[in-house]
Amino acid sequence: LPPTPEDIDSFVADEAPDAYERLIDRLLASPHYGERWGRHWLDVSRFGESDGFENDKPRDHAWRYRDYVIQSFNDDTPYDRFVKEQLAGDALEPITRDGIIAAGFLVAGPWDEIQNVAKSKTEKLRAHEEQMEEVLAAVGQTFLGMTVHCARCHDHKFDPIPQTDYYRLKAVFDGF
C-alpha cells in the first residue's frame, strides 16, 4: 500500500541511522506484505474462487488455499517447504491441516463440471485426462518453468521432455 502522508512525514523526520531498516522491517511485518506477494503466486497457481467454464460455480472453501499462500509469505516459509506442501502436503509427515490445504494447489485451476458429469465411461476417462493435463501444466509451468503438457501427445519440440517422462510425471499425480 502506498504510504500515508503521515508515514512519509514520520520517515522524513526520523534522523536515526537505522530509520530505513526499521521502515523495511515494519513493511515486511505487515500482513499486507503477504497479500501483495500472495497475489502474484495465486496468479501463477491459476487460483480461482469459482470453477470457470459454463456453470462457474463458486468454490466455497477456496479461500483456505488463498489464506494459506498469504500466511506462508507473511511467515517467510522457506521456498522448498512451500513447494513440498503444495505438491504433497497431504502426504508429508507429519500430516497437518496446512499441508492438506496447501495441496489445494493441485486443484486450484479451472474445473469443467459439464465435462466431468458425462454418462459414458469413455467420456469420463477423457475428462479425467483433460484434468490431469491441467494439473501437469500447472506443475510444469509453476515449478519447472517448462510446458510439460505438450509431451502428452509427442516428445516436446523445445523443452527436453520426452512423452515417456510426461506419463511418468502423470503417474505421480494420477489417482487411478
Image: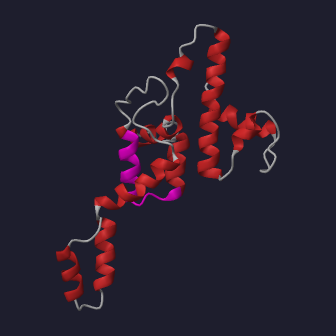
**Residue 102 placed where, x, y %?**
45, 42
- Residue reaching furthest to the top: 119
The answer to whether residue 137 is above or below residue 129 is: below
Q: Is residue 75 magenta?
A: yes
Q: Residue at 55% x, 42% y: name it.
A: 87
**Residue 103 placed where, x, y %?**
49, 39
The answer to whether residue 109 is above or below residue 29 is: above
Looking at the image, which is closer to me, 126 or 72?
126
**Residue 57 placed where, x, y %?**
40, 26
Q: Is residue 120 magenta?
A: no
Q: Residue at 80% x, 37% y: name it.
A: 163
**Residue 83 placed where, x, y %?**
54, 50
Which quadrant is home to the N terminus? bottom left
Q: Which residues are magenta?
A: 64-79
Magenta segment's dominant SS is helix
Q: Quadrant of residue 126?
A: top right
